[in-house]
Image (cartoon, rainbow, N blue to C red):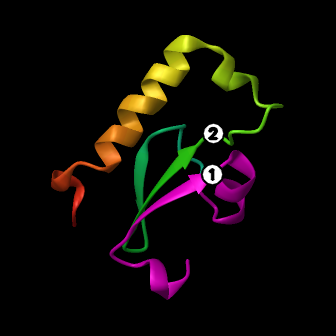
Amino acid sequence: MLPELRGRWVLLIGQGVARAFGVQAGLLEWVEREGAWLAVVPHPSGVNRWWNELRNVERAAAFLRGCLAPEMES
């Protein structure tokens, strides 16, 4: 993990990026790694069918709104 990420909240966009960081968390779940908090967000490409389901869009919207909440600050 890059030392610059310690103490930060980081959104990894797509499973490929998550794999590059060695993160195997479920989508939209925070995990702590080496002092950083990481979450995987599905890639917004048109190929990703995950976004085609309304319940997934609503779940992602709630998760991302929570990312903007003041209580997230470390």
Image quadrant for the C terminus?
bottom left
Task: Give the x, y percent position of residue 25.
Answer: 53, 45
What percent of the width, then of the height, locates residue 8? 37, 71
* 32 left or right of 28 in image: left
> Regarding mark 2 in the picture, which secondary structure is present there?
loop
Q: In the picture provided, is 60 more to the left or to the right than 53?
A: left
In the current view of this chain or complex, which residue is farthest to the right? 47
Q: Is residue 21 magenta?
A: yes
**Which residue is the extreme one toward the bottom?**
3
Q: Quadrant of the N terminus?
A: bottom right
Label 1, secondary structure: give it.
Answer: strand
Which label was assigned to residue 13? 1
Amino acid residing under circle 1 = Ile
User: Residue 3, how many percent across, how many down?
Assistant: 48, 86
Q: Is residue 55 magenta?
A: no
Which numbered tag is attached to residue 22?
none
First to last magenta residue range: 1-23
Q: CA distance from mark 1 to mark 2?
A: 6 Å
Q: Is residue 64 above or below residue 3?
A: above
Question: Please, what is the three-letter code of the amino acid marked with disc 2?
Answer: Pro
Residue at 30% across / 50% down in the picture? 68
Name, please, the residue furthest toward the top: 54
At horizontal 43% and vertical 31% (from top left) the residue drawn is 61
Which of disc 2 and disc 1 is earlier in sequence?
A: 1
Give the labeled residue for mark 2. Answer: 42
Measured from the top left, where is residue 50 in percent x and y? Answer: 67, 24
- Count neighbours of disc 1 (C-alpha within 10 A) and say few if under 14, some if 14 to 19, many if 20 or more: some
Q: 34 above or below 70?
A: below
Number of marks in picture: 2
Depth order, front residue of 30/34: 30
35 sits left or right of 18 in the view:
left
Q: Residue at x 47, y 85 (%)?
A: 4
